[in-house]
Image: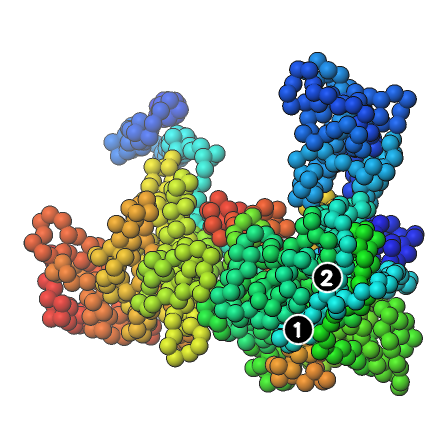
Amino acid sequence: MFVSYKWLQDYVDLSGVTADELAERITKSGIEVEGVEKKSEGIKGVVIGHVLEREQHPNADKLNKCLVDIGQDNPVQIICGAPNVDKGQKVAVATVGAVLPGNFKIKKAKLRGEESNGMICSLQELGIEAKLVAKEFSTGIFVFPNDAKVGEDALEYLGLDDEVLELGLTPNRADCLSMLGVAYEVAAILGRDVKWPEIDSANANENASEYIEVKVDAAEDNPLYVAKVIKDVKIGPSPLWMQARLMASGIRPHNNVVDITNYILLEYGQPLHAFDYERIGTKEIVVRRANQGEKITTLDDAERTLAPDHLVITNGNQPIALAGVMGGANSEVGSDTTTVVLEAAYFTGAVVRKASKDHGLRSEASARFEKGVDPNRVRQAAERAADLMAKYAGGTVLAGSVEVDTLSIEPAVVSVTLDKINVLLGTDLTVSEVEDIFTKLQFEVNTEDNEFTVTIPTRRGDISIEADLVEEVARLYGYDNLPTTLPVGAAIPGKLTAYQQKRRQVRRVLEGAGLYQAVTYSLTSEEKAAQFALEKRESIRLAMPMSEERSQLRLSIVPQLLEVLKYNTARQNDFIALYEIGSVFLKSEAADLPEEREHLAGALTGLWEAHPWQGEKKPVDFFVAKGVLESVFDTLGLMENIEYRQAEIAEMHPGRTAEILLDGKVIGFIGQVHPIIQNELDLKETYVFELSFKALADAEPEAIRYEAIPRFPSITRDIALVVDKETVAGDIQRVIAEAGGKLLKEVGVFDLYEGENMEQGKKSIAFSLKYFDPQRTLTDEEVTKTHDKVLSAVKEKTGAKLRG
Amino acid sequence: MQERLQELQEEALNQVTEASDLKALNDIRVAYLGKKGPITEVLRGMGKLSAEERPKIGALANEVRESIAAKIEEKQKNLEAAAVNEKLATEKIDVTLPGRPVKKGNHHPLTRIIEEIEDLFIGMGYSIAEGPEVETDYYNFEALNLPKGHPARDMQDSFYITEEILMRTHTSPVQARTMEKHEGKGPVKIICPGKVYRRDNDDATHSHQFMQIEGLVIDQNIRMSDLKGTLEVFAKKMFGADRKIRLRPSFFPFTEPSVEMDISCKICGGAGCSVCKGTGWIEILGAGMVHPNVLEMAGFDSKKYSGFAFGMGPERIAMLKYGIDDIRHFYTNDIRFLTQFHRHE
């Protein structure tokens, strides 16, 4: 809402309060003033001029040579390019020495050989937005009414000697969508009175009811309809001051009748509509729900197909307006209109919102109806508009109005105790202090036993409960004046849950290993949603996506991370390692909501080891990625519970992928991205993992128990085995560990050989075994006994041959 | 014989002095002090001497032998030290060459902000509550005093999945769920961080997915002054003790009274600049006293209990704190962006 500081003074005395001060005080008591625009800022030296002569520029087809009286001793010659400039016009002249917006200085100049002493201005050149300039002046200069006085300040005529406050209104403060509403707010803040406009009533001898009949077939949507009839209007421009106020408020002037309806919309917050009486075609107005498929062409020349959700104004046969949203082209007021039917109605928010949403039509009118207009202002607004039409459109207002009224207006009555106010705010206010605040707001208040019973004016539809009154008191008392305290009460310890602690710890481990945390979008394309999914399920689609690219909820994180890798490698980053912990969304047939599972995913590509001047370069491989994950498992105390199993996943390299099992259950995978996908993304060898973080974090590790530091030496024995190529190290290691029993402290792979000198289809793999007893020094015989058991178990169970 | 010994001593010492390496030195040792050496020979001839002279010459011979041995030892040490120094000289490195980088990654800047806020409030007795990102219309809107058809719903255009299910538009449904779990009994003290979604076109200041972090306190006798005090503690810890705060009345359907909090602009110190759009203040968060309808719907007696809630956007805080000019950076994950937030400040 744009509020003209000058205009506001019609309703409330602002003496002693500048526009900036007012803005500050309004902001502090509840409505954010987003800016104060000084309309004349950067403009100087623009006066009213009278074009005495105009002739074609001798050397330029599109230029005019004008002789303009600017109130000085002699008229000046000005060259003007506007197509509409003409002899006899009163125009805005930027004189030599003037400054226009953008620090544009006007100097004496020669245009195609002819002297020019100034510039005749369009409104755009005076800083008015093009969309607010009346159509007839939109491509040329602005022409003033003839009574404009030559030599006077043109800005004053145009109302540009003004400051405009831009209010950022929250949806509850619809009352401030009108100048009068703002006046009440300002009056409460300043402790001053509100002056209402004076309305002269009509005294024509004809009655409106002789011209028109009104019927409402949808009383629930339209409990009050008021029609007034004004005849003998002469369509023409509205007075300049009115146009100026409309423009300051962001509305483009059209003609006197339309401008008056818009002016009242701004003044009272009550949207009005003017119909051309003759063009309605019948003598009746019927308000009803639209029929399915019924059509109307609205004022913006768009044909719209209606449904029974929409409320329409009809002439008994066909729609002539989409109620509360926009008029119909068939009944539009035009230059030949002589009789006007003026509509002032109360339409409910829901029905207007539906139509405005379905047709994508948000108008000044619909915005106000949607948020609720003051039912007590409907008639007043109609009377005021009719009066202005008499004054500024030469009309005759017919006596009375035609109404359908099923609206019952009961002002809300809300009570609150002084104690409640003080307890909720932490203040120490007295009865009279609170009463004073309600009085300033012009709320009627009765006080009994420290309880305030407040009658809420209908303009303040946002106040209906105790807490609303507490807020009114708080904001006018001033939040700055509230005391500062901290909650008192039983102290409760604040801490992270075990799950949250694990998540933080895992982040740190991954970061310590060199991975950066990424945060990617949960919404993705249908194709990507299911890629790399741990569980193949149909992805969930949004009802109204903004694009196909972001239409599905992800089932996996890896595709998003690959997208990030692609972005980064395309920007010359030769190593990228990322992880993300975030939710994936699984469709659930059983529950309303999808199952959300927190996953941990990682992606690595490029050079893992790179120390160029020492000649080291080693790209990421499977075991780098696996090592990173193992440090996570180790931190979570799950090393013993994890297993890897060769696996095939469609998007992964068939030979370089493993499933990860936790206590025998698959919880994720790790491996190289399928080379075909790598190619599509222009990626080098890329390794990824994704696993259920929830499964990891929910697993309970064993408690930490101290083990005595060894006092006795251990004995190490190495074995080298020749096995089938297909035999995996993990299996052999398990056999060794089992057979080694208690004495075998550690077992690890220390060599792998598959090259020359090996029998076809075989490989050599060597393990180092460490035997140890915490109680004593082991003898050679004891170790040999156990070690022999290990060897025979390995031979028997894996078919291995001892090497060398 | 005495002369002979003195001759030998002089000769040997000269040779030791001139020896240039360990081998030459060893040769000297063998030549003079060995069993076939001249001193041994002199001693062997002592039989010809008188009983008087014999001990004298014997003592002298030992003296000569020891002085030569000492000189050899000294020379040996010198030669060894020189050899070590020579070797070390060849081992010199260029200490200005770069060190081997240690791998390190780091938090996303949004996590950094969120954890900082979490830790601050954990210290004040809050717990961290989390909830689903896909929500029911009930928890996202209705339980928060936003019934169907409420005008404020058009402030939050949402990604619906079905008519009753949507991507949550704020983290407030976590508050509603947590309150419900408390079954009408306080105190509740929680911080709720998480991702939220709105139907916005992505540009420099809008993102269809972003983060929120909210706080909620419910207990008997919670006052608006407690909210003010809590926010003041938060603002000073988060943004610096020298920052001023101001509360402005505002509107949210789930709180009444509602406020917005501004902090004084760090860039201009409150004088007005382009960052604060000339106002000297920067909007940081929204807050208010929990609306009685919200309390009641979650099973709390609004006559007995009151509470406050506040919420803010980690993106906005990070943008202000680090001077980031485009919200999309948080989700593009450009490595050149992510690597900027690893150190202490």
Q: What is the chain identity of the residue bearing mark 2? A: A
Q: What is the chain identity of the residue bearing mark 1? A: A
Which residue is at the front of the view, B32 or A465? A465
Q: What is the secondary structure assignment of the residue under circle 1?
A: strand
Q: Earlier in the sequence, mark 2 or mark 1?
A: 1
Q: Which disc is residue A491 wearing?
A: none
Which residue is at the front of the view, A329 or A104? A329
Tell me if label 2 and label 1 are in contact, CB under 8 Å: no
Say left or right for B44 vs B241: left
Asked if residue B294 is positioned above or below residue A568 in the image, the reply reads below
Residue at mark 2 shares a chain with residue at mark 1: yes
Q: Position of residue A217 (x, y in %)?
A: 62, 75
Identity of the residue drawn at 69% across and 75% down: A223
Pointer 1: residues within 10 angstroms few (<14), some, or many (20+)? some
Q: Which disc is residue A342 wearing?
A: 2
Q: Kindly give the residue lying farthest to the top in the view shown.
A: A113
Q: Position of residue A135 (x, y in %)?
A: 67, 42
- Is residue A331 visible to the viewer in this orientation of the structure? yes
Which residue is at the front of the view, A712 or B118? B118
Identity of the residue drawn at 80% across and 55% down: A395
Colour setup of the view: rainbow
Q: How many marks?
A: 2
Distance from the alpha carbon under mark 2 to that under mark 1: 15 Å
The residue to which callout 1 is attached is A215
Q: Which amino acid lies under the numbered mark 1 shown in the image of this protein?
A: Lys
Q: Quadrant of residue A441?
A: bottom right
Q: Which amino acid lies under the numbered mark 2 shown in the image of this protein?
A: Leu
Q: Position of residue A371 (x, y in %)?
A: 68, 66
Asked if residue A588 is positioned above or below residue B8 in the image, the reply reads below
Pointer 2: residues within 10 angstroms few (<14), some, or many (20+)? many
User: Where is the N terminus of chain B found, in terms of image quarters?
Assistant: top left
Q: What is the secondary structure assignment of the residue under circle 2?
A: strand
